[in-house]
Amino acid sequence: MTALAAHAGPSRWWRSRTTHRFVSHRLALLGVAMIASLTLACVFGPYLLPYDSLHIDLRARFAPPLTGQHFLGTDPLGRDLAARLLMAGRISLLVGFCAMLLSTLVGTLVGVIAGYRGGWIGAALMRTVDGFLSFPSIFLVLALAAALKPTPAMIVVIISVTKWMEVARIVEAEVRSLREREFVQAGRMLGLSSAHIMFREILPNAMGPIIVAATLTVARAILLEAYISFLGYGIQPPLPSWGNMLNGAQQYLASAPWLAIIPGAAITIAVTSFNFIGDGLRDALDVRNDGV
Amino acid sequence: MRAFLLSRLSQSLALLVIVSIIGFTILSIMPGGPSSQYGLDPGMSQADIERIKEQLGLNRPLWIQYLDWAWRLVQGDWGRSFRDGTPVLTVIGRHLFATLLLMGTSTAIATAIGTWIGIRGATHRYSLFDYLATVGAMVALSIPTFWFGLVGIYFFSLRLGWLPAGNMYTIGDGSVLNYLHHLILPSIVLSLVHVAVWSRYMRTATLDVISQDFVKTARAKGLSERRVLMKHVVGNALLPMITLAGMQLPTILTGALVTETVFTWPGMGRLFLDSLGYSDYPVVMGLLMFSAILVLLGNLIADIVIAVVDPRIRLA
C-alpha cells in the first residue's frame, strides 16, 4: 500500500483518488473478495475438513459431489476432493505468487538498467527480451522442466524464466521516458550515484505500471503452472496442485466429470480474480491502457 | 521499400542469432548437453560417452561448439530422432500440416468473431453488450485452454454425441467432411483466447479511427452510418491488427500444444510432448528452435504486409 500512497501524494492513502477509483471498480473488488476468501479457505480450510487430503478410502472411490459425506466427492483412490482442492490451492497460489515476485524482480532490474543506461547495453538487454518472447512460453517451460528436477522451487524459477520479459519491457519504456525529466537531471547535478538515481529517484515513479504488470503476472503464472502440471511436468504427485489434479481426469471424463470440472473451475476463478484486480489497478493508477 | 525491407530483415537476423544463443544455452543444460543433439544413446556407458564427446569435439570451448551447432542448423542438419533415427526436420515436417490446419482454422474463427465483437463494442460503447464483452474477454483469458477442451469434450462428445472427442480423422474414412467434423471442437477451443484478445484490440483500434477527422468528413458528406463504418472505419482499424496477428503467434502455438494434447491431434505440440516422454532431446530442441523461427518469420511477414498495405509505415 505504500506504493499507492506514494502515487497519490501526501494525503492518507484511503482518501486518495487512486483508492477511490479502485473501490468504485466493482469487478476489482469482487476479485479482491474472491482471492481473499480463496486464500483463507486454502490456508485454514484443510484444518476444518474432516478428511485428510492424502487419506485413501477405497470403499468411497468415485463418490459424486454432494452425495454422502464428501462435499465435492472423491477421486479414483477415494481421497476427499475438497481437501485435495484446498491443499492444491496452497501450492498453486504460492507458486503463482513466488513466480510473480521473482519475475517482477528480474524484469524490473533489467528494465531499469536498460532504460537508464540505454546505448548498447540497453539495446542488448532489450533484444534479449525480444529473443525470449519469440519462444512459445510453454515449449520453453516444458523443455526446461524436463531437463531440470521439477521441485516446486524449480517450477517457480522456470516459470519466471518465461514471464520476466513483459515487466522488463514496461519498466524500460517507463524509465526511458523519465530519464530526461528535471528531477533526474537535478539528481545528476547533485552528484548522486547512478544506482541511487535509478532505484531511489526513478523507480518509485514507475511503480504504477509495475504493480499492474505484477498482478497480471500472478494470473499468468498460475495458468502456466496449471498447464505444465496438467501435462505431467510441473508439480509432482503426491503433492497436489490444481493443474496436476486434472492430469488424470481426462480418462474418467465420462464416468466422473467432476474430477475435471472442479479443479479447472478453481483455476479459472483464481486467474479471473487476479485479472479483475489488475484491470482495476490499471484504471486506478491511471496506467495507459494497452487494449487488453 | 527496399531500405525498409533490408533494415527489417537485418533486425530479424539479429534476433535469430539471439534466439539461437538462448536455444543453445537450454541445450547445454539438457541431460547429455550438446551431445544429445547427435543421437547419443541413453544406454551408453560413461566411457562410450567420453569417447563420443571427444569425437564430436565437445571438449572444445563453448563458443566454438555454439558456432558449430548453429552452422549445422543453417545447413539443415538438425540431428536425428532417438526413436527411429529420422532426421529431425523430416519428423517436424510430418507434423507441421496438422498444426497449421488447426491454427489456421481457429485464427479464421477468432478473427471473424473478434472483429465483429470489437467493432460492435466500439460503436455501442458502454452498452450492456460492450460491458459483457469486456468482462467476457477477461474471463476467457483466464480459462485454461485444456480445461475448456475437457468441458467441451464432456458436453459435445460424451453427453450430446455431436462431435468426435479427438483425433484428426476416423481411420478408414479420409473424406474432407470427416476431417472438418474432427476440426470443429479443437479449433473452437483454441480460438477462445484469441477471440478475447482480438476483440479487445479491435475495440481500441476502432475507437481510435472513429475519432479521426476523415470519419467526420465522411459523415458530413451524408454517408449512412453503415457505409462510414464499412468503407472508412473497418479497413483502417484492421491495419494495426496485422501486427497483432504476428505478435500473437507464440500464444497461438502455446494454445495449439495444449489443445493438441487434449484432442490427441497429431501436430507439433503432440510431437513435442511425445518426444519429451521418450527423452528424444534432438526433436525437443528442434521443435523449440523451429517454433521460435516460425514466430520470427510470422512477425517479419506481418511487418512486410503492413508496409505494403500502409505506405506511411515504410516511409516513416
Image: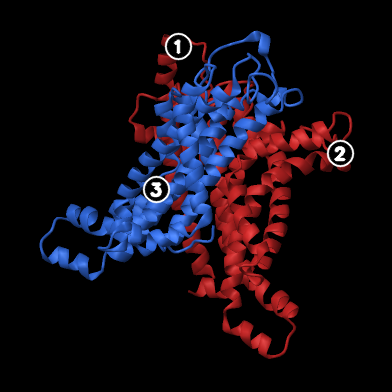
Quarter location, residue B55 = top left
Nearest to viewer (mark 3 / mark 1): 3
Q: Which mark is residue B178?
A: 2
The answer to whether the residues at label 3 and label 1 have Cβ atoms under 8 Å apart is: no
| Alpha-carbon span between mark 3 and mark 1 | 37 Å
- Give percent across and percent down for residue B300: 55, 57
Residue at 30 percent across and 57 percent down: it is A5
Mark 3, residue position: A128
Q: Colour of chain B?
A: red
Which one of the lettered chains is coloured blue?
Answer: A
For badge 1, the amino acid type reads Asp
Subunit ID for the residue under disc 2: B
- Give percent across and percent down for residue A219: 49, 43
Mark 1, residue position: B48
Query: For the residue carrying disc 3, how many other residues have a C-alpha within 10 Å: few (<14), some (14-19), or many (20+)?
Result: some
The answer to whether the residues at label 2 and label 3 have Cβ atoms under 8 Å apart is: no
Is disc 1 placed on a helix, strand or loop? helix
Q: Are marks 2 and 3 on the same chain?
A: no
Asked if residue B134 lies left or right of residue A281, the reply is right
Judge by depth and name the residue closer to the eye, A266 or B166.
Answer: A266
Judge by depth and name the residue closer to the eye, B168 or A174.
Answer: A174
- As drawn, the residue found furthest toward the bottom would be B221
